[in-house]
Image: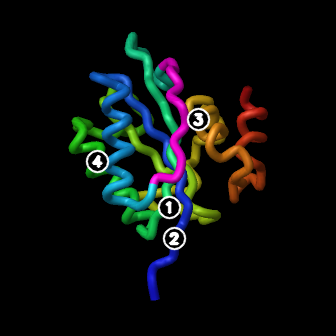
Amino acid sequence: MAPQKVKAYLSLGSNMGDREALLGRAAALLGERCGVVTAVSKTFETDPEGFRSPHLFYNIALALETTLSPHGLLSETQEIERELGRTHKSQDGVYADRPIDIDLILYGDLILDTPELTVPHPRFRERLFVLKPLTEIASETVDPVSGKKVSELLWDVS
């Protein structure tokens, strides 16, 4: 029996180097390695959140049909980040400039909490830089934790 396809939503950001090219390359690699990219939001330019930097972020959301497990998808996204120049992940909430950041936001209606991965992403409901692009491609998608549509979550924090 073939593995089941799941719709996953990812948030991508970049504030170093050629931000547009890095986001495009990350999206292409996700499509090559992780499944079928079914939607990509427009690019939003945002201030860094959680740290100070003169470098603004470009952020997009991406929908992906995948047969990878959540942990398999996490592994692939981390490998893509490394290939595109990310040398370290944020530690204990300390953020820094980065060429690429790929976060798994939603994975179907799965609720998962392991030491390596929490799905839905634990802070996506409060982050405009995630919710604005995500609403563009998944406004009717329901957050399995809150039971609210993505568009309602955006309304809550706007």
Q: Secondary structure at mark 1?
A: strand
Residue beneath label 2, please?
5
In the picture, the disc for residue 133 is: 3
Q: CA distance from mark 2 to mark 1?
A: 6 Å
Which quadrant holds residue 20? top left
The amino acid pointed to by label 3 is Pro
Eye-nearest disc, 1 or 4? 1
Q: Secondary structure at mark 4?
A: helix
Residue beneath label 1, please?
65
Q: Position of residue 17 (x, y in %)?
A: 27, 22
Q: Give the crowd class for mark 1: few <14, some 14-19, many >=20 residues within 10 Å.
A: many
Asked if residue 39 lies in the magenta stretch, the reply is yes
Q: Position of residue 100 (x, y in %)?
A: 34, 35
Is 63 or 131 nearer to us in this picture?
63
Sooner in the amino-acid sequence: mark 1 or mark 3: 1
The amino acid pointed to by label 1 is Glu
User: Is residue 98 at all visible to an observer of this figure?
Assistant: yes
Tell me whether circle 2 and circle 1 mark residues in contact (CB < 8 Å): yes
